[in-house]
Image (tube, grey):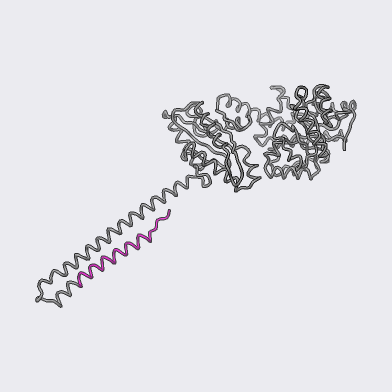
């Protein structure tokens, strides 16, 4: 706060004028008594003294009042300065410590931990905040963040919690702690966030995930402590969200493995060491081939076969997913020239759709290879439609307009939002294999698959039953109304060189 020096200058000038006035008044009184009263009234000599005394007392009283006022002004200035300093340390929206101050707080807690007072660091990330923010507006999103701030202040204290940015938060606890104690606190915070509340006229239950690390066991410095908590948070979110995970040494070993695999994957892309395999999708009645699904494969020269479930998440956490996606697309476009009557489905990661230049880059690959967009289908999951940002959804609309087909993959495994089938330009629905295979023993699953198949026909969409492994699976899928099928019963994913022989045996059955 800027000091108001003018205030003090005005008061000093007032004191000077009051003092000068008092002196002049006293002198004037002495002169008046000596001239007009003279010696005839000798007892009047006390009058100037009394006037002077009165002036001095008045001046003293004024000075005391002035000092009191200056003290009050100084206290107000000090209080406002302290408040401004506190505001500079806090996030305006949530009232929590801002990022820089919170990191300094962590540093201080780590220093105390090394001196014998342990501390625990908690990193909190809200689940599905961005789609909610995009759907209901930034004012709603700000209200949600403010609610999180109130919960954290109530549960752990305003000086122990901070907003790290966006929908990321952290808080620290010190004193006697254990893994079970920390996890109990984290669960309590998540439960408090999940309490039903009204925000902007909407009923809301906030969900989040928390990763925990503690000092001095897990840190060398504050950054290492935050890195450990971040690894635990990543495992919590990748394990299904809405969860609490504590750091352990296995996580660090996993991270070392992932980093090594990341370097080797980067080299595999550059050295053209990956392969694209194709699994046929057939007509459920005639078993003639309808389309192909492209699947990337990696056979490491030392590690052997590495499944996509291991290296795709690693690519998604880095910029490698863009390089990997473009490599796969280019390979598919080159192979597609061999099968002019077949559409090829390509799995696209939400991370790829976050790139604003995604469509421009796939257009460049199409131009380079001469492949037509109508030959390709982009496969997306329900989760992308549910959790995707407005930019990602806009990308999908642009891709559809460009001429690509859009297939909804693994339907039923996620949110099963029928609204998306109605409102989004989906061309084909693929029912998740867990439902298809459970039709053997579950009447409910048979009913579910039948309902989706009927819905698909009503919306003029083909419906594919995934995971067909036995003739019984095929009969049940056909009876449920699935127009097409995919699974090991027909063929496992195969190299491009083996596809022509399969087509020759099965024939093609391209549907309009």
Q: Residue furthest bottom?
A: 36
- Where residue 188 appears, as percent x and y from the top left, is 53, 32
Q: Quadrant of the C terminus?
A: top right
- Where residue 358 appears, as percent x and y from the top left, is 72, 42
Residue 432, quarter of the rendered image? top right
Figure label count:
0
Residue nearest the observer in this picture, 262 or 474: 474
The vertical placement of 177 against 89, above or below, is above
Q: Does the segment drawn in magenta span residue 13?
A: yes
Residue at screen point 15% across, 78% down: 36
Residue at screen point 87% across, 27% down: 287
Residue nearest the observer in this picture, 448 or 269: 448
Residue at screen point 42% across, 28% down: 116
Question: What is the span of residues highlighted in magenta in the rendered image?
Answer: 1-28
State the predominant SS element of the stretch in magenta: helix
Residue nearest the observer in this picture, 51 or 421: 421
Q: Is residue 463 left or right of residue 356?
A: right
- Where residue 85 appears, as percent x and y from the top left, is 44, 47
Residue 437, quarter of the rendered image? top right
- Where residue 135 appears, as percent x and y from the top left, is 66, 45
Q: Is residue 159 left or right of residue 386?
A: left
Residue nearest the observer in this picture, 411 or 419: 419
Residue 51, quarter of the rendered image? bottom left
Q: Does the segment drawn in magenta span residue 490?
A: no
């Amino acid at each position: 706060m800027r000091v108001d020096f003018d205030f003090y200058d005005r008061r000093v000038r007032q004191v000077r004028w009051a003092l000068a006035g008092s002196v002049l008044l006293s002198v004037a009184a002495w002169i008046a008594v000596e001239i007009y009263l003279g010696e005839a009234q000798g007892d009047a000599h006390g009058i100037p003294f009394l006037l002077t005394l009165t002036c001095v007392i008045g001046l003293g009283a004024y000075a005391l009042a002035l000092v009191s006022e200056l003290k009050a002004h100084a206290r107000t200035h000090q209080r406002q300065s302290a408040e401004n300093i506190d505001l500079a340390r806090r996030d305006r929206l949530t009232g929590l410590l801002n990022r820089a101050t919170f990191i300094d707080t962590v540093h201080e807690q780590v220093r105390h931990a090394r001196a014998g007072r342990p501390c625990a660091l908690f990193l909190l990330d809200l689940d599905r905040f961005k789609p909610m923010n995009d759907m209901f507006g930034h004012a709603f999103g700000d209200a949600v963040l403010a609610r999180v701030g109130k919960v954290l202040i109530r549960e752990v204290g305003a000086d122990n919690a901070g907003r790290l940015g966006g929908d990321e938060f952290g808080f620290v606890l010190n004193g006697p702690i254990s893994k079970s104690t920390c996890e109990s606190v984290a669960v309590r915070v998540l439960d408090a966030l999940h309490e039903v509340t009204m925000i902007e006229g909407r009923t809301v239950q906030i969900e989040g995930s928390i990763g925990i690390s503690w000092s001095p066991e897990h840190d060398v410095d504050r950054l290492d402590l935050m890195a450990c908590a971040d690894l635990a948070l990543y495992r919590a979110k990748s394990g299904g969200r809405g969860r609490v995970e504590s750091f352990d040494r296995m996580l660090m070993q996993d991270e070392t493995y992932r980093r090594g695999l990341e370097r080797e994957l980067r080299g595999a892309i550059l050295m053209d060491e990956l392969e694209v395999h194709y699994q046929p999708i057939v007509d459920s009645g005639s078993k003639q081939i309808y389309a192909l699904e492209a699947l990337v494969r990696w056979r490491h020269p030392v590690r052997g076969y590495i499944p996509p479930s291991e290296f795709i998440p690693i690519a998604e956490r880095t910029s490698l997913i863009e390089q990997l996606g473009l490599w796969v697309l280019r390979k598919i476009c080159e192979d597609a020239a061999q099968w002019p009557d077949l559409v090829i489905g390509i799995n696209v990661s939400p991370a790829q759709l976050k790139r604003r230049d995604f469509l421009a880059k796939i257009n460049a690959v199409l131009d380079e290879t001469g492949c037509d967009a109508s030959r390709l289908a982009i496969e997306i999951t329900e989760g992308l439609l549910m959790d995707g940002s407005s930019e990602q959804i806009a990308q999908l609309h642009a891709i559809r307009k460009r001429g690509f087909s859009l297939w909804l993959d693994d339907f039923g495994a996620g949110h099963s939002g029928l609204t998306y089938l109605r409102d989004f330009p989906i061309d084909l629905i693929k029912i998740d294999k867990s439902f298809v295979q459970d039709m053997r023993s579950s009447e409910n699953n048979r009913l579910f698959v039948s309902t989706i198949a009927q819905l698909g026909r009503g919306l003029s969409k083909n419906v594919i039953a995934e995971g067909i492994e036995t003739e019984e699976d095929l009969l049940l899928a056909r009876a449920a109304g699935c127009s097409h099928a995919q699974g090991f019963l027909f063929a496992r994913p195969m190299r491009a060189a083996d596809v022509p022989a399969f087509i020759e045996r099965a024939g093609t059955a391209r549907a309009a």
